[in-house]
Image (spheres, rainbow, N blue to C red):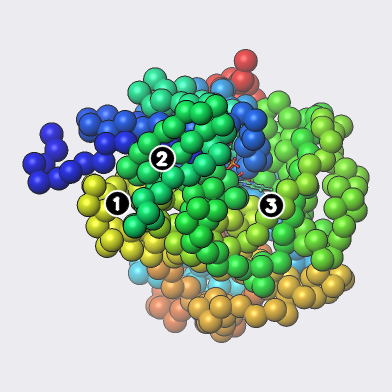
Amino acid sequence: MTSPSRRPIRNIVIAGGGTAGWMTAAGLSRFLREQPTTVTLVESDEIGTIGVGEASLTLLAHFNHMLGIDEADFIRKTQATFKLGIQFNDWRHKGHSCFHPFGRYGQNIDLCEFHHHWLRLRAAGQGGSLDDYNLNTVLALGNRFSPPVKDLGSPLSGLAHAYHFDASLYARYLRDYAEARGITRVEGRIVEVHQQPESGFVTGLSLKDGQRIDGDLFIDCSGFRGLLIEETLKTGYVDWTGLLPCDRAVAVPSRRGDSPLTPYTRATAREAGWQWRIPLQHRTGNGYIYASGHISDDQAAQALLDTLDGEALADPRVIRFFTGRRAKAWNRNVVAIGLAAGFLEPLESTSIHLIQKGVVKLLQCLPDMDFAPSLADEFNRQTAFDYEDVRDFLVLHYKLTQREDTEFWRYNRHDTVSDSLRDRMELFAATGRLFINEHELFKTASWLAILTGFGIEPRGYDPMADALPFADVSHALIRMRTMIAQAAVQQPDHAAFIARHCAAH
Ligand SMILES: Cc1cc2nc3c(=O)[nH]c(=O)nc-3n(C[C@H](O)[C@H](O)[C@H](O)COP(=O)(O)OP(=O)(O)OC[C@H]3O[C@@H](n4cnc5c(N)ncnc54)[C@H](O)[C@@H]3O)c2cc1C
């Protein structure tokens, strides 16, 4: 039932059928099923999708759950593997490795956060490695996997996982889902966008074959070009290439070979950027993200091919991008989601997560025919925050590096950062304290992983940690480490777990 005073949106049109288009369609099909709203998605096989984007964050499991998707079925159909975190190699300096896991480190004692107890022990030459307090890390580095358990007394309850998956297969999977729930798919190339002359609101799309698709609300999922939000509405772009100077990627899949199926993404720093390695069931995804002012496309492609751990399965493909976000993700009656809304390099696998957030925000702010401007303002405020939040966390990686071996690293290291990021880094270095806003995507454990992993040794810790006898804290932390080590060795090999529970056919 809709309220009598409301004039609900009748027709929603999604322009684009990549990951963003089909995640939006799936979300709308699930939550608008009782509404008198039709949803039409237009995509063009001729244009295709970006075709990369294979590692997620843990919250994708919630999105799938919200849609009622069975995890094992999703894994089988998208050739997925489990992801427990990201291994950063050669970032701090060549030869160094550290791990950014999902899930928490240790347990808080009384009111004091775990890491202050650990820092207190560290100051006395005890406490061991932070890695030993995170089960995700210990499992990942042993190529083991387990899903979390509900028993809060078990260390396995603190586990958290994401996925590596074939994004094209995921889009296909969601297409089946959305079409089964009434979404109409139209194949065709959009050649013209129609607008109301006075308001500039978009009224319809003309396709190459002469069809016209009219709508009240348009979701721009057309990729980097932003067919509606930019090419039609000229919304503008906030450019962050000064903060994150990589502007290209070269990608190539490779044969999996005999190497173990790692339950983590690998991000290895290179001469003019960094290289990803993402293991799927049927192949490995690889790519080199680089700054074109510091290396040519051919050199980057060769560097990538030289470092694959299996035979290349295609020619390397170069992708250009501009780091930043659309000045407004919602302009008039157009809402941009996915690459049309902005792009940040995939160092922490955040783009698909930002799509997910965009879809959820859209559902929460869904307008009626009055298009209250305050809804668009709120959507834009939250979207700007989400992109800036991720941007600062990515910049952190470049600022902390101690590499000076190429111009690329020297430039990144000494470039400026936002005031809030600088303040947070200084506060942590001086006192070990981290104050994370509840809306931030990356929580204390993530900041801790990168700050300490990349070499910041705080000079202090929260004095509340001193309230407990040193020996008690020392024993408590030994117990935590031991429980984690014991739990880890009992878990199955990652590949064996997949073979048993969710192998792709
Ligand atoms: C190098 C690289 C690596 C990445 N790695 C990750 C990662 O590890 N993790 C992660 O979360 N994200 C990653 N991403 C981001 C991820 O790939 C994208 O966020 C995701 O694929 C969404 O893309 P999209 O749907 O917005 O755009 P696209 O995939 O480009 O889809 C655009 C759609 O619009 C349609 N279209 C465009 N113009 C027209 C027209 N005129 N008429 C009709 N249809 C049209 C196309 O046919 C297509 O269907 C990566 C991105 C890049 C560039």
Query: Along the horizontal axis of the image, is 224 left or right of 301?
Result: left
Q: What residue type is labelled 2?
A: Gly
User: Do tag 2 and tag 1 residues touch (Cβ < 8 Å)?
Assistant: no
The three-letter amino acid code for the residue at tag 3 is Gln
Residue beneath the point at 60% across and 67% down: 239
Can residue 415 be seen by looking at this rendering?
yes
Give the foreground label among 2 and 1: 2
Numbered disc in front, either 2 or 3:
2
Mark 3 surroundings within 10 Å by alpha-carbon count, few (fewer than 14), some (14 through 19), many (20 or more): many
| Other residues around mark 2 within 10 Å, as few (<14) / some (14–19) / many (≥20) | some
- Foreground residue among 311 and 372: 372
- Residue that badge 1 annotates: 365
Q: Which residue is at 48% across, 36% downward?
A: 206
Residue position for label 2: 204
First in residue order: circle 2 vs circle 3: 3
Residue sitting nearer the eye, 488 or 288: 288
Q: Which secondary structure, mark 3?
A: strand
Determine which quarter of the picture holds residue 111: bottom left
Quarter of the figure that contains the C terminus: top right
Q: How crowded is mark 1: few (under 14 residues within 10 Å), some or many (20 or more)?
A: some
Q: Nearer the viewer, mark 1 or mark 3?
A: 1
Determine whether, in the image, residue 296 is placed left or right of residue 423. Answer: right
Query: Which image quarter holds the N terminus?
Result: top left
Q: Along the polypeptide, which appears first: circle 2 or circle 1? A: 2
Residue at x 61%, y 20% (from the top left corner):
504
Amino acid identity at mark 1: Cys
Residue at image location 87% in from the left, 71% down from the top: 405
Kind of element beneath mark 1: loop
Which numbered disc, 1 or 3, marks the residue that appears first in the sequence? Answer: 3
Mark 2–mark 1 Cα distance, whole angstroms, equals 22 Å
